[in-house]
Image: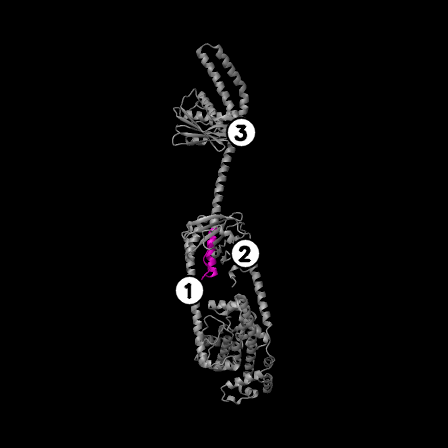
Amino acid sequence: MPDKAATPPGSPAASSAADARARQVELILERVRTLPTLSPVAARLLSIGTIDEVLIGDVVKIIESDPALSARILGLCRKADRGLGDRITTVKRAVLMLGIEAVRSAALSVSVYDLMTREDDEARQQLDAAVATAEGADDAAKPIFDRHGFWKHSIAVACAAELTAQHNPKLRVLPEEAFLAGLLHDVGKLVLDLVLPRSYQRVLEVAQRRACDSAAVERAVLGLDHHSAGRRVAEHWGLPHSIQHVVWMHGQAYSVLPDTPDRPLIGIITVAKALCRRLHLGWSGDFGQPPDADALWQAMNLRSGGPSLIAAPLHGAVADRLKVLGLDDTTPPSLLLESVANANRQLSDLNTALQERANQSQSQARVLEAVEQFHALGAMRRTITDTMGVVAQSAWSAFGEGFYAVLVQTSPDEPWRIVQLGPDGLPIEAQIMEAPPARVGGATLASLTSATQLNVSVLGLLPWLSDHLVNGPDLRRLRLMPLPMPTVPNQREGQLAAVMINDRDMGEGLAPKALRAVTATWGFALSAAAEREGCRRLHDQLVESNRAVAEMQALLAEKESMARLGETTAGAAHEMNNPLTVIAGHGQLLLSRLENERDRAAAEAIASAASDLSSLISSLHLLSEVPTLRPRAVNIGDLISAAIAAARSRLSGNATAISVQVDATDAHLDPDATTAALTELICNALEACPNGPISLTARTLGRVMVLEVQDNGPGLSDKARTHAFDPFFSERGAGRGKGLGLTRARRLARACDGDIRLENLPVGVRATLELPCAEQVARP
């Protein structure tokens, strides 16, 4: 049956479906109009007027023109309980005995029965041939539509309606008219089985499986029910309007029927049908609980005594009519036994249906428990792999022990990942797989969204899976169950695709909607896990980007401040160099001329101050201009010795012990810049730890030279860690440092595309100088 919830009302898809359904209905009605018309005799009988307008001789001539019909009428007359027996030998005497209305109704009944039986035989032969061709002659399914039982039920309803009209003359319904209406009330079912035998076979299968009446299933599958089809064929045959109304509206509650002259006739047919279904007379084509005949009887305010008034003689009347029409040669007792057998068979069918529903309910309950367990383990579904494990636990719980693996592709340009899972949800084996064949059964594997399992062999995936499931079960038994992903409007391309591989029949005893609910739950959870992983990756990328931005902003601010400082110091150095040269020169001149020790000390102080100021200006000049680098092959040991000597000279021959460990001999570096930067780090360590010891190591990491200087001093304060490389920052006492050593060292390191890091240790500080080197030779 179509899934009505699949397309929302008013949507283009729903409008297109409605147009298709309307065209389907028109095609069915067009096929109804192709059915043969009634025989000329029946048509002429329909064309005659009321009894006041017709001569008996005219009716006799019409019937006598059809010998077969004449024989049927005489047989019907002989069955009438009028005490005449075999004395009625002519059609004229039969008409006089039965009346014109009774004869006309009987003639029409015989004509319709003969016509529909002949057409039904032809259609049934076509259906049998089609079923045999499709399924094999030995395994051809037996058609559900019981022609013999249907006509028997129709005659039973006709007889019940006739008896009801006889017992309730106040309704002003002719018994003969009630008989004809009862005989033809469900002609629409026969019409649908004639024009659409295979489709109507499916309708009856669904109705029987659901234990419901056929009309609702007919509307859902075909677009119209047997009431509409029957009304159309009644119009096609030119049947009286009262018969058309019965065919169209029978089965409805008496209170909702329109207040027309045909209302009592429609109500009688509804009561008669309910009674015949309760008595299991024939095969009605409906499988639901029949309406309450007693309640319908009371709603029409019929004669006291209820339907039991007509139930008693009904079996005898039906047996007589069956003989007259040549449908069955039976007796009232045998008909009663057949009704009991029908009741037992229906009860058995109901028990079977109830057992199937009970089994289905158990399967659905098991699945619901698995879904509940799946949601209860929501805290464990942090990643896609975690969610796969919970899916496996849910599958083991819902469908039993077996082989379960999940195929996942996070995006179309990514490879497939297959994870075999155990009952505890832990991965047994995980592998990365190349993309499967481009097309699988007419579609890509990632686009499979069917709610039914697909066989791996049929899809041609055995070669693809055989290399990755070596330890799995027989691959020919494996099936694929697509796990549908949520569809979101304007969703980005490349969303997660997931398929479960298993060796179980997951749809056994389970409604397709229930199975789809389970697989959709799994698919949604996997999609949510993929989104969470994507969000986590995006968060990490954003954090890293923010960190990089912050570092770049700090570096940019530092460069800007250094540039401004460089511009200032460049001008100041230019203006101060000449006065400093004069001061230094005159200081040296005075020192050579003076003999007094006190004066000589003053002259030395002047010359020393001028030299310090000149050195400061040179350091500031370094901040404004990047020095020209000349890298070359140098010996690391010689470079370290030069830096230590320069540091000791600057600190007036400081003799603190320095341990040196060199794990590299040669490197391609700028010796002047490297020596100057390393000298500043050694000076800082010697000043922080004047009593030593100090360690210095040199090693290579790939194509990077790492020089580390470590002291045992008090370490860096929080303020020093933040501002250690700022120009003129120093925590030493006034006059003990200019605060440019580390600034100058980092400037030189970055000029060489390297950097300097400071970190506190449990005892002391470690300063690390990292410089890229084009060539290095490892220590043997």
> Is 664 placed above or below 362 here?
above
Label 2 sits on a secondary structure element that is loop
Report whether 285 appears left or right of 235: left
Callout 1: 10 Å neighbours few (<14), some, many (20+)? Answer: few
Write down the residue under mark 1.
358
* Span of residues in magenta: 501-526
**Circles 1 and 2: CB atoms closer than 8 Å:** no
> Is 332 placed above or below 287 here?
below
Q: Amino acid at mark 3?
A: Ala
Q: Residue at x 46, y 12 (%)?
A: 600
Write down the residue under mark 3.
563
Question: Depth-wise, is mark 1 or mark 2 nearer the camera?
Answer: 2
> Is 557 placed above or below 303 here?
above
Q: Looking at the picture, tell me which residue is in the foreground, 597 or 341.
A: 341
* Mark 1 vs 2, N-terminal side: 1
Q: Which label is found at residue 632? A: none
Q: Position of residue 406 (x, y in %)?
A: 47, 52
Write down the residue under mark 2.
441
How far apart in space, not on screen, are marks 1 and 2 (Cα)?
Answer: 35 Å
The quadrant of the rendering that contains the C terminus is top left
Q: Looking at the picture, tell me which residue is in the foreground, 332 or 33.
A: 332
Label 3 sits on a secondary structure element that is helix
Q: Position of residue 364 (x, y in %)?
A: 43, 60
